[in-house]
Image: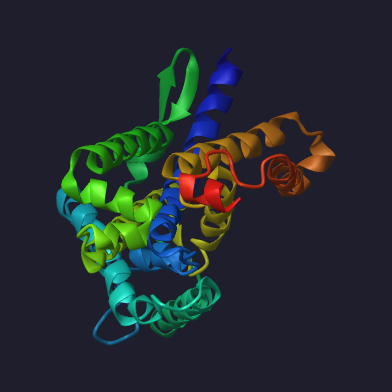
Amino acid sequence: MTALLQILFDALSLGSLYALGALGIALIFGVMRLVNFAHGDYIAFCVFALLWPSIDAAAIVFAGNLPTIILIPLILAIGAGLSVLSEILVFRRFRNANPATMMIASFALGYVLKNFLLMLFSSRPKSIDLWSNLSQQVEIAGARIPLLQVITITITIVILIALTAFLKRTRFGLEMRAAAENFTMARMLGVKANRVIMLAFAISGMLAAAIGLILATQSGTVDIQMGMSVMLVAFIATVIGGLGSLPGAVIAGFLIGGASVLMQVILPLEARPFRDAFVYGAVIACLIWRPQGLLAPKSAKQRV
């Protein structure tokens, strides 16, 4: 029982990161039909915002010593600001372009952000001490679970509940849902395109910042490539969940996280280094069985 509980928490913790990443990508795809491959670089940028070169350019100043009540809103605001700025400066110019053009633009933006961080901080990973006390373990039903896992799962649940309430109970949320179903019709009914798109980018940026904080706390390091693995799995989760479906993206994120942890447990020791191959094999099987995704939105079903 203890071992099963540990596996469950591991799966939920990893699935939470993938679900948050998939949600950020699905939000943008829903209103713009854009797969934003710069999302992983948003994650790294937000974490590197904790660091900045000192005046003599020979040392790094760590901002993680700020009070938590200031630090978290600050990093979330940086994520939202970066995402909205990228929409204004880059993606707004491509609204009438085909999706492939916008996707290439997102790749280019990601490389710009990556090389900007390289100029400031170099490619060497940096060690940071961000809420290291969260690595302590707590006992739950006889199992010893890292406190950070419990907090990660709790934060994800709170974010999902808050975002669900926002989308269903507020005017802005209703506009975003309408735009995700049929953006052209939504605009004809009076929905302001700029407002909806900028709001989607802001929420997506805040989700990227939240993932960055969790990853930095887990690993104790910041790396320019730290967001790429989450971005890849999150994109796969949006496809499995059904492109444009927010619930589908979240469910698929948790499923992939659970599959990764389960494969690590059930595979023979000699096969565990190839766990990802088995996970992606299951992804292929899922797409063969249901190519439109688990919860494809109505617009996608009509196209199929």
For the residue pair 209 and 241, the one nearer the viewer reads as 241
For the residue pair 120 and 207, the one nearer the viewer reads as 207
Instruction: Tell me if residue 9 comes above or below residue 132 in the rendering.
Output: above
Q: Residue at x 45, y 63 (%)?
A: 33
* Image spot of residue 91 (x, y percent): 37, 76
Q: Residue at x 71, y 48 (%)?
A: 280
Q: How is the image coloured?
A: rainbow
* Image spot of residue 285 (x, y percent): 75, 42
Residue 43 seen = yes
Q: Residue at x 64, y 39 (%)?
A: 260
Residue 58's image quarter? Answer: bottom left
Dividing the image into 4 quarters, which one contains the N terminus?
Answer: top right
Residue 100's image quarter? Answer: bottom right
Q: Is residue 254 left or right of residue 185?
A: right
Q: How many numbered circles does the render carry?
A: 0
Residue 61 seen = no
Instruction: Tell me if residue 266 comes above or below residue 72 in the rendering.
Output: above
Q: Residue at x 15, y 54 (%)?
A: 70
* Image spot of residue 136 (x, y percent): 40, 34
Instruction: Tell me if residue 216 comes above or below residue 50 in the rendering.
Output: above
Q: Is residue 295 left or right of residue 26?
A: right
* Image spot of residue 227 (x, y percent): 49, 61
Instruction: Tell me if residue 174 comes above or below residue 102 in the rendering.
Output: above
Q: Is residue 265 left or right of residue 93?
A: right
